[in-house]
Image: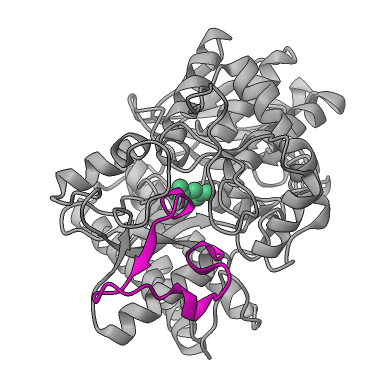
Amino acid sequence: MIVIGTGIAGLSTAIFLKKKGYDVVVLSKEEELQETNTYYAQGGIIGPRPEDSSQQLKEDILEAGYHYNSIEAVNQIAYEGPQLVKDFLIDKVGVKFSCNEAGEFDYTGEAAHSIKRVLHYKDTSGEQIENSLLAYARKLDIKILSSYVSIDIITNNHHSRDTRELYKEREVMGIYALDEESGEVKKMLSHYTVLATGGIGALYKHTTNSEVSTGDGLTMAYRTGADIINAEMVQFHPTALFHKDIKGFLISESVRGEGARLIDHDGSTFMEKYAPEQKDLAPRDVVARAIYSEINSSGKDYMLLDVASYYEGEKDINKRFSRIYETCKEGGIDITKEPIPIVPVAHYFCGGIKVDLFGKTSIKRLFAVGETSCTGVHGANRLASCSLLEGVLWPQKAAEEIDKNFKPIEKNRFAEIPEWKSPKETEKFDNILLQQDWESIKLTMWNYAGIVRTRHGLKRANADLNYYTNRIFDFYNSAELRKNIIELRNGVVAASAIVRAAMHNKKSIGCHYLAE
Ligand code: SIN
C-alpha cells in the first residue's frame, strides 16, 4: 500500500493499515518528514470531555459551516472523533496534552465552540502530535521514504499497455515518483493508494501554511478524473503575525479563546460591531472579514491583538503560549506588555477530493484523507480544531474499509504498466523563471481569490491562470524533472481549480465571500 504524506492523516493511515497486517510505504516529498501543516498546528484537537456532548459538537460544526456540511460526515466526526483521540492518540500513540494543576486536561476554547473542548500541548500541539506519530510509526517498522516526490497516479485506463484496460472501470494501480536523491523516476505499484498530501496554502501570497502545501494530491487526483468539490472554500485565519521579517506566523485562535481581544490602532475593540454576541470568538470567516474591513477603512496595514490587557488563562502568558511569546519576542514584540500586529492569511482548504465516510474517492482503489480530501465535515467554513480530528478519524475508517474489501490487483495486470519515460532531451531551468511564475500565481490568488472576491476579479484570475498554465506545461514537458517543477505544475492546476469553483458558485457563503 502507498500512503503519500507524513502529516497526521498520512501517518495515522499507515499505522492503522500496518496494525491490520499490511505492508505500507509512506512517502514524503520533503527531506524533513515533519515538514507538514500538522507540525505547525498550534491550537489543538477536540477531545472527549464529560461536560460536552456529541450533539452539541455537531451543532457547533454545522453552525460554523453554515449548514453547508454533509450531515453524515458531521455525525461521524461528532459521535466518534473525540473518543478516538483518547483511544488512539493518547492511549496508543502516547501524545501528551497540557494539564492543569490538578492533573486534569486543560481544555481550551476557540472561535465558535460553545464549550472549551480543545486539547492542546501549550501552543505546540501539532509538533507534539507529529513527533509522537512519527516515533510510533517507526516503532511499528513502517517504511517511510523522504525526498520522494509523487508525480502522477497510475491508472489502468491511462497507463496500461493492455488496450483492453481502456474499456474497464478506472482503477488506481500506484504512482510514479521522483527519487530526488538519485534523480530517477520510480514506478511504485500498489493495490491501494492513499493521498494525504495536505492543503493549498502555498498558492497564496500570505499564508500560515508551510511552503509544501502546493495542492499536489488534489491535482494528481484531478488528473485521474476524481471528483473535486467545494474547492472555492479556502479558509483564512484571522490572525497571523504582521512583521517585516517573520512571515505567516500563526497567532493561535486559542489566544482569543483565553480572552485576548482584537483592537484597532486607537486601542478600541471592534468585533462587537460585526458579531454582537460572539464578538472575537465569532466564526473565522466573520472575524477575518471584520479585520480585512477595518484594515481597508483605516488605511492601516494591520490590526492588533491585545493579549496583555485581556488574558484570562491560568498559566502565565509566556508559559501558556511559549512559541508565540518567543517568536514575537524575536520580532521585538513583548506580548505580555503590548498588542500583537496581525493580518488575516490563507490557512485551510475546506474543499478537496470528494470522499465518502471511509475516505473513498470516486476512483476505484484511490483513497484521500486529511486536508486534501473533502469529507463534507467543514461545509462552508471549518470549526477550529476539527481538522486534526478529521485527520485521525478518516484514516481509521479508510483502513477498515480497505481491509474489509481488500482485493489484490493480479500480477499480469501490474506487468502491463510501463516504466516512466523521460523526454530524450531535457532542459535545466533557471530558478528565477520558476520563482516568477510562483509569485504571479500567489499574487493572483491573493488578490482575486482571497478573503473577499468579485466576479471581475475571478474572471481575471481565470484568464491569468490559463496563461500561466500554458507556459508552465510547456516547460514541464521539456524540463529535467525536479521537485520545484512538479510542484509548480501542481500548484497552477490547483489554483485554477479553486478559481473555477469560485466562479461557478454564485452564492456568497462562509469562506467563499462574494462582494458583487
Ligand atoms: C489555531 O490555533 O488558531 C489554528 C487551529 C485550527 O486551525 O484549527
Of the pair 334 and 470, the residue shown nearer to us:
334
Residue sitting nearer the eye, 479 or 270: 270
Please tell me which residue is depicted at 66% across the width and 81% down the height of the picture: 507
User: Residue 70 in magenta?
Assistant: no
Tell me: 48 left or right of 285: right
Q: Which residue is at a point 74% across and 61% down the rendered structure image?
A: 69
Residue 471 lies, with reference to residue 329, above or below; the image says below
- Is residue 260 a member of the stretch shown in magenta? yes
In x, y percent, where is residue 34? Answer: 40, 30
Horizontal arrangement in the rendering, residue 237 relative to residue 206 (left or right) = right
Relative vertical location of residue 365 with respect to residue 207 in this rendering, above or below:
above
In the depicted structure, whether residue 38 falls above or below residue 250 = above
Residue 393, image x and y in percent?
70, 35
Horizontally, residue 73 falls left or right of residue 140, namely: right
- Image quarter in which the N terminus is found: top right
Whether residue 302 is visible? yes
Task: Tell which residue pokes out farthest to the right in this image.
Answer: 405
Q: Residue furthest left?
A: 332
| Spot occupied by residue 13 in the image (x, y as percentages of width and height) | 64, 28
Q: Residue at x 73, y 66 (%)?
A: 68
In this view, the residue in front, 219 or 458, is 458
| Number of callouts | 0
Which quadrant of the figure has residue 192? top right
Q: Which range of residues does the magenta coloring cover? A: 254-283
Instruction: Name the residue rendered at 44%, 23% in the picture.
Output: 131
Give residue 320's position: percent from left, percent from top.
37, 37
Q: In this orientation, which residue lies closer to the viewer: 210 or 310?
A: 310
Q: Is residue 429 left or right of residue 140?
A: left
Is residue 473 among what the camera can see?
Answer: no
